[in-house]
Amino acid sequence: MKDGRTLIALTGCPNTGKTTIFNGLTGRSTPTGNWSGTTVEPAVGSFMYSGCTYLMADIPGSDSLSAGRGWETLTRDFLRSGLADAVLVVCRASALERGLSYLDRILRLERVRQTGLPVVLCLNLWDEARKRCVSIDLDLLSDVLQIPVVPCCARCREDLDDVKTAVHHACTTAPRSRFRYECLDFSPKRLADACCGRRRKPPAAFLPFDRVVTDPLYGKLFFLFLMLVLFWTTMVVSSPLAALLQQGMTRLGGPFAAFLSWSDAPEWLISCLVRGIGLPLAWALPYMLPPMAVFFPLLALAGETGLLPRAAFAMDRCLERCRACGRQCVSMAVGLGCSAAGVLSSRAIVSHGHRLTAILTCSLIPCSGKFPLLAALALLFFAGFPASGLTDGLTRALILTGAFLAALGVNLVLSRILSRILSGNRSPAFILELPEYRRPRFGRVILGSLFSRVLLVLGRMAAVALPAGMLIWISARIYCPGPAGGWFTFTAPAGRIPSLLDALIRLLAPAGGLMGLDGAILAAFLIGLPANEAVFPLILMIYLQAGSGTAAASLSQFLVLQGWTWRTALCLMTLCMFHWPCLTTCRTIRRETGSLLWTAAAVWLPTLAGLLLCACLNRLLSLVP
């Protein structure tokens, strides 16, 4: 007990709904997923019941308490530390033997046996067990284990109240002498067989479909088709939404400028807010926001149904041929949302060398920060804008699918090279649990994706673009005439003395030309290091402050005036996929590896790959008439 609050350790096997129960009890919004390994770091929340305050620690799920994996060591050490006043063990009701096996390991801990630590067993996913016609004798189970046993469906508020009641009773009203485990000895298999009964065989409605999805060949083709459908839906729906949003931004631009003029704001402030920040954001958002608002909820629905773990299973044979660990495919799937989260999920890999391989290649998978730029380029330069029909959306979907396949191919090639260097030629075996298919909660998943992903991306973009826009506006007005002119001045001197921004663009222009780009684009990538989401607005800000294309009426016309073509778009998409990770991912890699050397390797590996691929692609495209 700490500060008058009782600490409850929430633990259990992976993918049993622990975090969903944690969110329901504490009101937190910790990310959940229909696959194992979602929780890799402890989370703490609190709730009140019957006048008592309870702290709950959601620790990573595990099948054992050995020291083989990092999170297993964390779980074991936390339970041994004596910090917890009670333990809530969550298991799947339809997989009782597995849960009892994990419970037996907890009850055999010396700290639990000596102190009589209260333990409560929660049988989660009770509704799925009933659908599978599984009946459990709760009274017999509780009598044998001598601990409270409570069935639960994490989506049901009444069941969560029953969990609170059981925990409160175990911590306050139940005598401490009840929780004595010295003489407790049971066989998880025999006890599960004695307590479980099956009235009839459940229908295998998804069995034929699951055989196709998990097939070595047809599974890959299915997920390739699924990716194409997701991108096609995103492009078809986003195109008219982008046109409407563009019209709205155009109509708001005039009143905003008029308001600044009416408020007697200084001319420099109006120039900074309107041309330095407002206009680039108003041009970029209509092409970035709709694809995010469509694609991220669709991807979340695919994960909720249980398809993403099967996509990782389909990739296992490819990773085995690359001599990489199959669990790396889980890190790649998580990296679609955030590269930093993908790095954290690599904790599931036991081998140090294979885990380093997963960390070094995680940023090669396009994350939520890179996808808006890829989608915006597809809308702007391929099949016209807005789309004239479904075939235009198919063309853009094929472009995005090809981009993701290219990222996957480069990831596999580099994984094979790094695995041979860091781990030899052996690909370790691993256990990947395929969850049951679930009907997604459409409203909750869509709203959760919009608030947790889309708004997060927009917030990161604004947090970087606003100060960076001011920095670009200022650097475009600082000149360096040398010691005779005072080194730095805000007044344009006579002659062709460039500003700091122009000097940076000219410095990067040769490298940009070799890659089919220009110095302004490379400068935007350097300035956008904290967040990849801000790269596209930063490109527009640099172009506007450089003084080119000021008479353009639309974004597409503006980019054409800068010399952009479909070749430029393809080279930019390549650099977007293969360049240094964002600052958050770099900090995560530094924390996970504990080495600046490996962090630098994680930065330079995708950067060198991007530079080389851009140069080769530009050379090939130059041969196209």
Image (tube, rainbow, N blue to C red):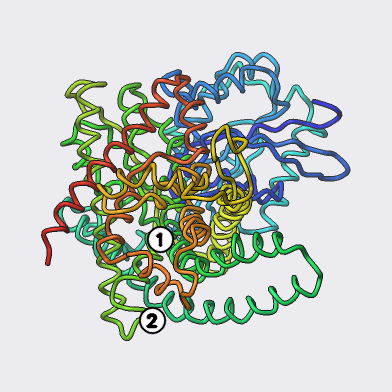
What is the residue that sits farthest to the bottom in this orientation?
388
Q: Relative to 50, does residue 71 appear above or below in the rendering?
A: above
Please indicate whether residue 474 sits to the left or right of residue 612 in the image: right
What residue is disc 1 on?
Answer: 302
Please indicate whether residue 95 sits to the left or right of residue 203 in the image: right
Q: How crowded is mark 2: few (under 14 residues within 10 Å), some or many (20 or more)?
A: some
Instruction: Say which label, 2 or 1, has the lower sequence index.
Output: 1
Q: Name the amino acid type tagged 2.
A: Pro
Q: How crowded is mark 1: few (under 14 residues within 10 Å), some or many (20 or more)?
A: some
**Residue at 40% in and 73% down:** 556
Q: Is mark 2 on a helix, strand or loop?
A: loop
Please indicate whether residue 197 sits to the left or right of residue 165 in the image: left
Image quarter in which the C terminus is found: bottom left
Q: Name the amino acid type tagged 1.
A: Ala
Please name whichever residue, 47 or 446, is drawn nearer the observer in this view of the structure: 446
Image coords of residue 416 (percent x, y): 20, 32
Image coords of residue 34 (percent x, y): 45, 51
What residue is disc 2 on?
Answer: 386
Image coords of residue 206 (percent x, y): 31, 63
**Residue at 37% in and 31% down:** 602
**Residue at 50% in and 59% down:** 537
Image coords of residue 583 (percent x, y): 51, 38
Badge number at residue 374: none
Image quarter in which the N terminus is found: top right
Please name whichever residue, 318 or 127, is drawn nearer the observer in this view of the structure: 318
